[in-house]
């Protein structure tokens, strides 16, 4: 995968995350700037940050629960961003981080 292809995939992913938050009605704000998507929990001001790492072809997630790295893996059902240590899907870990930090359930479909 080229860097341009990686960036295109991550742009699509970040837009999907923004859309999911918007449609969920959760009291969260988001800002996409400089390759980072910052989610702010309005109730307590805590943040969840997703950043792209083009040289490694990874996405990094920073939350109160810790820092996690994700790589795109091809499966029978399509491509899936998975934790490089636990193989947990990014969609699941991001939902858990949103619930833990904001108290609101957000489902991500990517």
Image: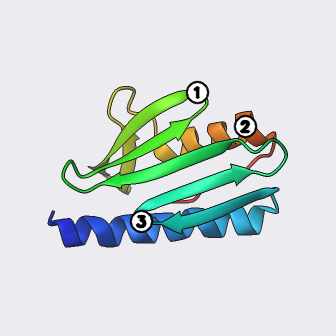
Mark 3 touches mark 1? (CB < 8 Å): no
Task: Give the quadrant of the N terminus.
Answer: bottom left
How far is disc 2 from disc 1 in space, using C-alphas?
9 Å
Relative height, residue 6 to residue 46 (above, below):
below
Residue shown at 23%/70% (left/top)?
A: 5
Residue bearing the label numbered 3:
34
Q: Secondary structure at mark 2?
A: helix
Query: Residue drawn 19% across and 66% down?
Result: 3
Task: Determine whether, in the image, residue 89 is placed left or right of residue 63.
Answer: left
The disc placed on residue 41 is none
Q: Which residue is mark 1?
A: 65
Nearer the observer, disc 3 or disc 1? 3
Residue pictured at 47% horizontal, 42% vertical: 61
Pointer 2 or 1: first along the chain: 1
As helix, strand or loop, the secondary structure at mark 3 comes to loop
- The percent position of residue 98, horizontal first and vertical second, equals 68, 43
The image quarter in which residue 25 lies: bottom right
Please tell me how crowded label 3 is: few (under 14), some (14-19), or many (20+) other residues with Cα within 10 Å. few
Residue corresponding to mark 2: 101
Q: Is residue 68 above or below residue 81?
A: above
What is the residue that sits farthest to the left in this orientation?
A: 2
Provide residue 2's location: percent of width, then percent of height. Answer: 14, 66
Whether 28 is drawn above or below 102: the answer is: below
* Marks 3/1: CA–CA distance: 23 Å
């Amino acid at each position: 995968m080229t860097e341009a292809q990686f960036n295109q995939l991550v742009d699509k992913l970040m837009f999907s995350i923004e859309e999911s938050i918007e449609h969920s009605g959760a009291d969260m704000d988001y800002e996409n700037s400089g390759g980072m998507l910052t989610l702010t929990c309005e109730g307590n001001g805590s943040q969840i940050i997703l950043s792209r790492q083009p040289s490694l072809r990874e996405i990094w997630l920073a939350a109160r629960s810790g820092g996690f790295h994700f790589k795109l893996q091809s499966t029978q059902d399509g491509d899936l961003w998975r934790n490089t240590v636990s193989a947990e899907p990014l969609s699941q870990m991001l939902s858990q981080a949103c619930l833990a930090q904001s108290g609101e359930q957000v489902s991500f479909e990517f």
